Image (cartoon, coloured by chain):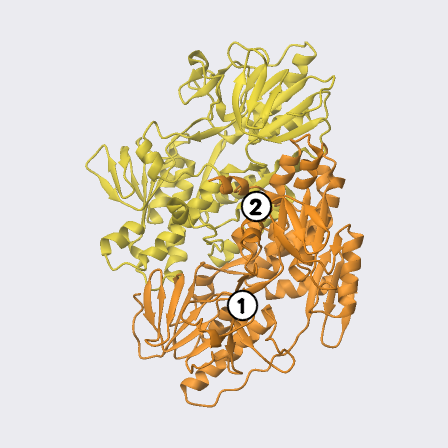
Chain colours: A yellow, B orange
Amino acid sequence: MNIPKTSYPRIIIIGGGFAGVALAKKLSKQEVQVVLMDKNNYHTFQPLLYQVSTGGLEPDSIAYPIRKILQTFPNFHFRLANVEKIDTVENKVLTNIGELKFDYLVVASGAVTNYFGNSEIEKNSMAMKTIPESLNLRSLILENFEEALLTSDLNERNTLMNFVIVGGGPTGVELAGALAEIKKGILPKDYPDLDTRMAQIHVIQSGDHILKGMSDKASEKAEDFLEKLGVNIWKNVRVTNYDGKTISTNTDLSFEAATLIWAAGVKGAMIKGLNAKDLITKGERLLVNEFNQVTGFKNIFAIGDIACMVTDDFPIGLPMMAQPAIQQGEQLGDNMLKLIENKPMKPFVYKDKGAMATIGRNKAVVDLPRFRFQGIFAWYVWMFVHLFFLIGFRNRMVVFVNWVYNYVRFDREARLIIRPFKKQLKE
Amino acid sequence: MNIPKTSYPRIIIIGGGFAGVALAKKLSKQEVQVVLMDKNNYHTFQPLLYQVSTGGLEPDSIAYPIRKILQTFPNFHFRLANVEKIDTVENKVLTNIGELKFDYLVVASGAVTNYFGNSEIEKNSMAMKTIPESLNLRSLILENFEEALLTSDLNERNTLMNFVIVGGGPTGVELAGALAEIKKGILPKDYPDLDTRMAQIHVIQSGDHILKGMSDKASEKAEDFLEKLGVNIWKNVRVTNYDGKTISTNTDLSFEAATLIWAAGVKGAMIKGLNAKDLITKGERLLVNEFNQVTGFKNIFAIGDIACMVTDDFPIGLPMMAQPAIQQGEQLGDNMLKLIENKPMKPFVYKDKGAMATIGRNKAVVDLPRFRFQGIFAWYVWMFVHLFFLIGFRNRMVVFVNWVYNYVRFDREARLIIRPFKKQLKE
């Protein structure tokens, strides 16, 4: 890869997500050469993907060009690349566009959907971790209703109008709420020929409550909100298989649905060369010390979802969320400069800023370290925080315009089948 | 197709473009049953597609759900369908989702890109008539620059950075201007490693001036604007072939470019069953009389780009633009009601409201029937008119926000490779 050699130490960052971008910003004005690699040319604001899937936001408003972020950073290089392997002996990364040596490496490759080895579910279900995946889901939801119109077979029609979400975490809960609002506010108007009351939304949760990372109060209230919206919640049920039509579980329950959205788990986006057994923890994450150094290495770091940092409060590692990623990225920036100058690094301490989830119009739950609240105020807080963390003024404005419009008009106008999903399957 | 039979006459409209939507609105409160069919579930605002291709607007802001347009129209049905054939004997349309009888049929199927039979050009070039095509072009432009970074072969690098637009009509001119502004304002910041001054933009025009439907003054000024932006204009040159790398012409000139955008012509989007020789004119359009009736039929109409209405001022048919489509749709609505009530129909008279094209920041040309002007005021008029004709308040707001942002910041932030185009080619 033709990156000029300079006298500055070279830092390669793999991944332009929350962690990678936070780190890049910290290193922006420093005497280091930084090469950021990502398989996309944009940063994705993952917390709002469910709104893309449900037509509330355009995809471009939650994506931001990485080159734009780096424009004003001297000594920065971006490469659109798939990292295929890390060579820890020669200190280089091997990618689809060539290899490159590093002095320091930061793995910030994020997370991918975890199907826990079930290839049948992987093949037949929809995921929602990337923008193309979210757009595929948007297309499929709309295609299902168009198709439901055409059949006179009642069973088939209901199957097409049933949506089963596996996983009661924030993603599953937010998606279920959005689908319920579409069912109530948009479907009857868009499909007057169809009895859309028959459409069903199910959330299946393996544990005994939803939003398990949050407080009991938040979990109970979220469940209450969802039930009021007409969502069916099934607790202590584990999905065992899905053939594209029938969903089997570990209980007597089974569901007929043309769409299963798998939001039941994530795992680290592992890269070859660092996947030695002793490096990896449950959830396929890289075990790191308090300086985010990968076990056994001085110059290789991991931050964000891919990094598993065990603390007293988090014995299986910090949660795979935006906040730990951003905080680790920022602190690693400071620590790397210390390391380069042979000064002692500062151990990372996670500041838990809380968690939140929105269920629908005026309905959200927020757990802050000192306060917990639910309802309309929580909903405003949720929106404010998401707008604040979005990158880019234009994106914020476009998201804001959409939210105001959607709120005032009870609408979601991005219900567009731009690239039909079922056609992609056939091709 | 399961559309309920009512006592109202059934009108099938094929196509939800400018013409079809204008007609639908006119019929919205009348005693007719209307079935609108389109292969997409959205209306496309085609005049702004070039801004999608060049990252200035998100695709969702120039698309509008057809079902949303029809929501408040009683007795309207939408079907997402590909019309495969029209049976003029049995009065029915045959589609991929079944067949349906009509009392009246309106063909408003629009236009497709015309390659004039050159399959090599069709295979290797990019078109810009639909949203997926525009997104493919957006991806390809960005992928080319990412790839140009990687090669040390100067020839290959320049080939990747060369863009040849065939056709000097509004589409070609507007796209060339936008690309020139990207070259000037964005590329040097996004690709500091690349000598983006080497990027070239060519417009090839077979005639002796560009914007040939407009006034001489508009044409000259547009050419002047483009040249000031660094665009190369080649007149009286006809492209004869393109193998994906080398563009041959009918002169000594040839060009090396990884991207050829074909904006050299359109033709009617013909449907089988109406393609008898005597019905069709040059440009593969359906010959219609002054009531938009297809030759030989009382109950089959064509409006918009697919219809060829010959007048004294337009001996080869009205131009394939938004205005004739909208005006024909509106008037046909009135005429159909007259026809149903056995009243005489009113002949269509085209009101030429003028034409306009934007070249770039503060640079547009406008020909109104009484006034002609160019420059910054023309640019404001162009923007106002386009915002006015966009469907939907949300779309207008989002486009407006983008335009203000792009203007103030000299930027275009939707430079995202969401679905890589070259990867699609490989698959």
Residue A249 position, x and y percent, is 24, 35
Give the residue drawn at x 48%, y 38%: A130
Q: Nearer the viewer, residue A23 or A380?
A: A23
Using a 10 Å C-alpha cutoff, classify the residue at mark 1 as few (fewer than 14 neighbours), some (14 to 19) or many (20 or more): many
Give the residue drawn at x 45%, y 43%: A134
Residue A411 position, x and y percent, is 47, 56
Q: Nearer the viewer, residue B114 or B5?
A: B114
The chain that hosts pointer 2 is: A
Which image quarter holds the N terminus of chain B? bottom left
Instruction: Tell me the SS state at disc 1.
Output: helix
With respect to residue A291, does A4 lie above or below?
A: below
Residue A337 circle label: none
Q: Residue furthest left?
A: A252
The chain that hosts pointer 1 is: B
Find the distance from the CA under tag 2 to the CA under tag 1: 27 Å
With respect to residue B102, does A139 lie above or below?
A: above
Decide if residue A303 is in sight here: yes
Q: Are labels 2 and 1 on one chain?
A: no
With respect to residue B173, does B414 lie above or below?
A: above
With respect to residue B253, does A33 lie above or below?
A: above
Q: Label 2: which residue? A: A61
Instruction: Inspect the image, locate mark 1, and give the three-letter code of the amino acid beneath it.
Output: Phe
Q: Label 1: which residue? A: B18
Q: Nearer the viewer, residue B38 or B30?
A: B38
Using a 10 Å C-alpha cutoff, classify the residue at mark 2 as few (fewer than 14 neighbours), some (14 to 19) or many (20 or more): many
Residue A12 position, x and y percent, is 61, 22
Pair 2/1: label in front: 1
Instruction: Inspect the image, locate mark 2, and give the three-letter code of the amino acid beneath it.
Output: Ser
Q: Quadrant of residue A165?
A: top left
